[in-house]
Image (cartoon, rainbow, N blue to C red):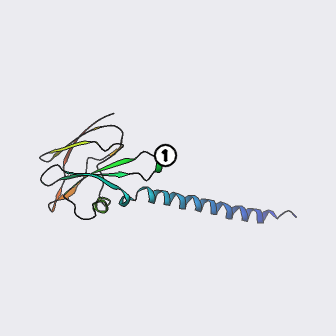
Amino acid sequence: SNMPLKTVIKWFHYALTLILLIIVIGFVMLNAGGDNRADDKLVSSQQISDSTWLYVTEYSGGGATVANSYRYYLSGKLEGNITASLAKQVPFLVAAGSAANVSAEGNTINIKYSGRVFSFSNSIVYEANGDATLPHINFQATN
């Protein structure tokens, strides 16, 4: 009644392929869900200069186990579905809190933030009043 070895190997191969497929699908779904920024909630929008606005969105896709994170964007004034527009842009700061102090002096954006920083990028370009703007970012973080 014992199966020939060939059949066992074949069956094992199918099982392994199936398991790998499930892992890959799970990983893809996890990552797709993890960065669906259209689900972000807009928590603040403030004008920091005549052409530049600061938008902050809250991301809580991790459920109860993962702390909320906040994405900070610089942009010209956005109309309509702001979170959908922001989802196409790169946040310059992703942090655990929503209370970064952001101000503009000319082409310099000053950011003071106290708390946990997940990611920061100082090379961002955004459109403001129809012009591409590349601000100088002065970032001070304390934990």
Residue 121: image x %, image y %? 29, 47
Farthest-out residue, right: 1
Q: Residue at x 40, y 57 (%)?
A: 35
Can residue 93 be seen at all in this image of the molecule?
Answer: yes
Q: Is residue 118 above or below residue 27?
A: above
Most foreground residue, 44 or 27 = 44
Q: Is residue 106 above or below residue 90?
A: above
Q: Residue at x 41, y 51 (%)?
A: 60
Q: Quadrant of residue 120?
A: top left
Residue under label 1: 65
Residue 123: image x %, image y %? 25, 49
Quarter holding the N terminus is bottom right
Helix, strand or loop at label 1? It is helix
Q: Residue at x 14, y 60 (%)?
A: 129
Most foreground residue, 41 or 90 = 41
Q: Residue at x 85, y 62 (%)?
A: 2
Residue 17: image x %, image y %? 63, 62
Q: Inspect the image, locate mark 1, and give the three-letter code of the amino acid beneath it.
A: Thr
Most foreground residue, 60 or 32 = 60
Q: Residues within 10 Å of mark 1 (few under 14, many from 20)?
A: few
Q: Is residue 72 above or below residue 83?
A: above
Q: How many marks?
A: 1
Most foreground residue, 39 or 36 = 39
Can residue 55 be seen at all in this image of the molecule?
Answer: no
Residue 56 as seen in the image, left or right of residue 22: left
Residue 15: image x %, image y %? 68, 62
Quarter holding the C terminus is top left
